[in-house]
Image (cartoon, rainbow, N blue to C red):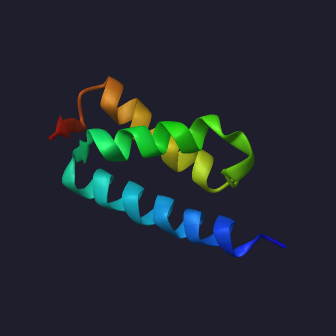
Amino acid sequence: MASTRERVSSLNIHKIVGRILVSGQLSRQEYVHLITTMLSDNHITDEERPQLNRVFDSIQSGQIKFVD
């Protein structure tokens, strides 16, 4: 069973990714949070990984812009 911390993190990742994909923008702070989450592999669910990959792919293709 997932701990409360992991469930809250999952919920936050889902909200952040959804907002980023809809707006086409993300802050540097959100970027650092997503990278940190991605690199701490044990906190990512099988559902979150493709969402995070989609954000990073969209950044590389220029579909998502950084805002400060």
State whether residue 4 is above or below residue 50: below
Image quarter for residue 8? bottom right
Residue at the limit of the structure toward the left, as seen here: 68
Front residue of 27 and 47: 27
The residue that appears at 51% across and 49% down in the rendered structure is: 51
Image quarter for residue 25? top left
- Residue 61 x, y percent position in the rendering: 30, 25
Q: Which quarter of the rendering shows the N terminus? A: bottom right
Marker count (numbered):
0
- Residue 48 x, y percent position in the rendering: 59, 53
Is residue 53 among what the camera can see? no
Using residue 66 as the reference point, say whether residue 40 is left or right of it: right
- Residue 6 x, y percent position in the rendering: 67, 65
Image quarter for residue 64? top left
Is residue 68 among what the camera can see? yes
The residue that appears at 37% across and 40% down in the rendered structure is: 31
The residue that appears at 41% across and 31% down in the rendered structure is: 57
Using residue 3 as the reference point, say whether residue 25 is left or right of it: left
